[in-house]
C-alpha cells in the first residue's frame, strides 16, 4: 500500500525480539485487523508492519477516512491481546532502543544514561525515535543519530 507522507503513524516497541514463529502469527493478526479497521463505519486505509523483529508500526492515511479515538482504542485492544498471548510489553515508553555493534539493544533511561557516562553511547549512536507521528517522519527521523532526536537532551548533564 502506498501512503502519503502525512499519514499517521503509531510505533510500539516490544521489550524483546520476536521469535520467527511469533512474527508470522502476529503479522497475520495485524493484517486481519487493519483490513477491517474502521472509524465510524468507514474503512481506514491502514497497514501494520513489524520492523526489526521488535517494532509494530501502524500507518493510517487519513485522506480516505480520519482516525477517531474509538478506532485508536481498537488498535490498542489488539496490541493488549498480543501482549498477553505472546508475553510481551508493548507500552513501556521508558525503554530506549538503540543500535550498537551487536544489533538493536533496549534499556531503561537510567541504563542509557550510564552508557553515555561510560562513553559506550555517543551522540552519533543510532537511536529509534518512537515519537514519530507521520509516515514522512518515520522515513526520515525514526532511526537517526541521538543528536538528531529527543535523546540528545540526555547528553546535557554529561557535557562539561
Image: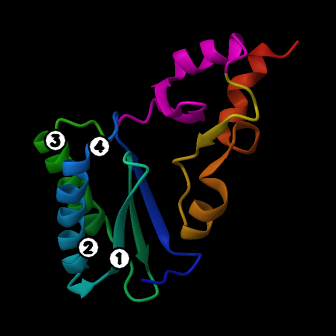
Whole-number angstrom distance, CA of label 3 to CA of label 2:
19 Å
Frontmost of labels 3 and 4 is 4
Residue 114 in magenta stretch = yes
Whole-number angstrom distance, CA of label 2 to CA of label 1:
6 Å
Frontmost of labels 3 and 1 is 3
* Residue to which mark 4 is pinned: 18
Instruction: Report the residue that reaches farthest toward the right.
Output: 160
* Residue to which mark 1 is pinned: 46
Mark 4 or mark 1, earlier in chain: 4
* Residue to which mark 2 is pinned: 34
Mark 4 or mark 2, earlier in chain: 4
Q: Are marks 3 and 4 in contact (CB under 8 Å)?
A: yes
Whole-number angstrom distance, CA of label 4 to CA of label 1:
22 Å
Q: Quadrant of the N terminus?
A: bottom left
**Percent position of residue 151, x then y:** 65, 34
From what the image shows, is residue 60 above or below residue 73? below
**Percent position of residue 92, x then y:** 37, 34
**Percent position of residue 118, x then y:** 69, 10
* Residue to which mark 3 is pinned: 86
Amino acid at each position: 500500500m502506498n501512503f502519503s507522507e502525512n499519514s499517521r503513524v503509531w510505533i510500539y516497541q516490544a521489550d524483546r525480539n520476536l521469535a520467527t514463529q511469533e512474527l508470522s502469527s502476529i503479522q497475520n493478526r495485524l493484517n486481519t485487523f487493519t483490513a477491517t479497521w474502521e472509524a465510524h463505519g468507514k474503512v481506514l486505509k491502514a497497514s501494520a508492519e513489524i520492523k526489526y523483529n521488535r517494532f509494530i508500526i501502524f500507518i493510517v492515511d487519513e485522506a480516505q477516512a480520519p482516525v477517531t479515538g474509538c478506532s485508536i482504542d481498537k488498535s490498542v485492544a489488539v496490541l493488549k491481546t498480543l501482549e498477553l498471548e505472546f508475553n510481551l510489553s508493548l507500552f513501556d515508553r521508558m525503554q530506549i532502543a538503540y543500535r550498537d555493534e551487536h544489533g538493536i539493544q533496549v534499556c531503561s533511561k537510567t541504563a542509557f544514561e550510564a552508557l553515555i557516562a561510560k562513553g559506550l553511547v555517543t551522540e552519533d549512536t543510532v537511536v529509534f525515535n518512537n515519537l514519530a507521528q507521520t509516515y514522512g517522519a518515520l522515513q526520515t527521523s525514526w532511526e537517526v543519530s541521538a543528536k538528531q532526536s529527543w535523546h540528545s537532551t540526555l547528553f546535557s548533564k554529561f557535557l562539561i
